[in-house]
Image: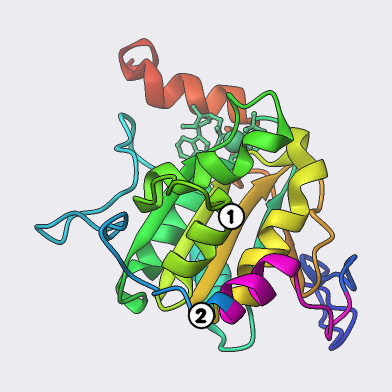
């Protein structure tokens, strides 16, 4: 773990000074507060399913290892002052898989559950707001910018937002900063090949899977996806 504010040994979690100053307030927040928009409304539905189920995508292979990483990131995420944790690492290291496991482990601590936002298919940073709006159940309201509607909807929710594969959308990190500044009950778990550099970000470098004789991830993936090929 590492932190610019409180250094810790181990060098895996860090905190970025970020782009946005502490006192800076996003224009969207100022407008929403001034307008006194309701924070919940007909355009909103909870991220958790009606039966209390998870909003996380189901996995078709079992998770290997990662117990220590899951516990560490969950504990970090659940610290009261921690609002944004970014899992960082090269392609295929297991960032998304770890984020899903952490979200599942942390879900019960969020009264409004978890929303998973897959960003990999997006080609335009300008679409990040609408990509988030969908999984949290927010729809465009006539005449109001979607970011304002989203802020109004999330400002009273106690929600974990998982933003998966942010690396190609770094031009949209202000959206994350705006949401965090405007929504005190919101936390973000992001995965990215590079840091978001949003104020208060905690960076967690995802280590390779530590499995004796198997640790290159392609070997692990092959074992999980085609177990028959590994039987004697
Ligand atoms: N601990 C694990 N147990 C089982 N399978 C895993 C584990 N970690 C990763 N995998 C599998 O390896 C593949 C790559 O993992 P993942 O998609 O999480 O990588 P990533 O770091 O998010 O990659 P990218 O940067 O391309 O998004 C996936 O098929 C995933 O299910
Ligand atoms: Mg990924």
> Which quadrant is home to the C terminus?
top left
Secondary structure found at label 1: helix
Taking depth in this image into account, of 132 and 194 the one nearest to the observer is 132
Q: Nearer the viewer, residue 8 or 6?
A: 6
Q: Quadrant of residue 49?
A: bottom left
Q: Residue at x 44, y 45 (%)?
A: 140
Image side of residue 213 versus residue 6, left or right: left
Per the image, is 58 magenta? no
Specify start and end residues of the magenta stretch as a single range: 21-34
Residue 128 drawn at (x, y percent): 62, 41
**Drawn side of residue 205 relative to residue 51, left or right:** right
Q: Which residue is mark 2?
A: 78
Q: Position of residue 138 (x, y in %)?
A: 39, 51
| Residue 170 appears in the picture as rendered | yes
Measuring 53% from the left and 40% from the top, which residue is drawn there? 130
Question: Residue under circle 1?
Answer: 147
């Amino acid at each position: 773990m590492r932190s610019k504010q409180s250094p810790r040994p181990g060098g895996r979690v860090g905190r970025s000074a970020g782009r946005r100053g502490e006192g800076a307030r996003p224009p969207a927040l100022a407008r929403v507060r001034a307008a006194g928009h309701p924070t919940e409304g007909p355009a909103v539905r909870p991220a958790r399913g009606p039966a209390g189920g998870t909003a996380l995508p189901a996995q078709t292979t079992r998770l290997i290892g990662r117990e220590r990483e899951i516990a560490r990131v969950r504990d970090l995420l659940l610290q009261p002052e921690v609002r944004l944790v970014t899992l960082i690492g090269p392609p295929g290291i297991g960032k998304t898989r770890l984020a899903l496991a952490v979200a599942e482990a942390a879900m019960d601590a969020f009264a409004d559950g978890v929303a998973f936002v897959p960003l990999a298919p997006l080609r335009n940073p300008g679409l990040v707001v609408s990509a988030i709006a969908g999984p949290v159940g927010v729809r465009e309201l006539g005449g109001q910018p979607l970011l304002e509607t989203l802020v109004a909807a999330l400002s009273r929710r106690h929600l974990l937002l998982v933003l998966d594969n942010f690396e190609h959308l770094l031009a949209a990190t202000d959206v994350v900063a705006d949401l965090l500044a405007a929504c005190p009950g919101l936390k973000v778990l992001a995965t990215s090949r590079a840091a978001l550099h949003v104020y208060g970000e905690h960076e967690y470098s995802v280590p390779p899977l530590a499995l004796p004789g198997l640790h290159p991830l392609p070997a692990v993936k092959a074992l999980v996806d085609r177990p028959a090929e590994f039987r004697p």
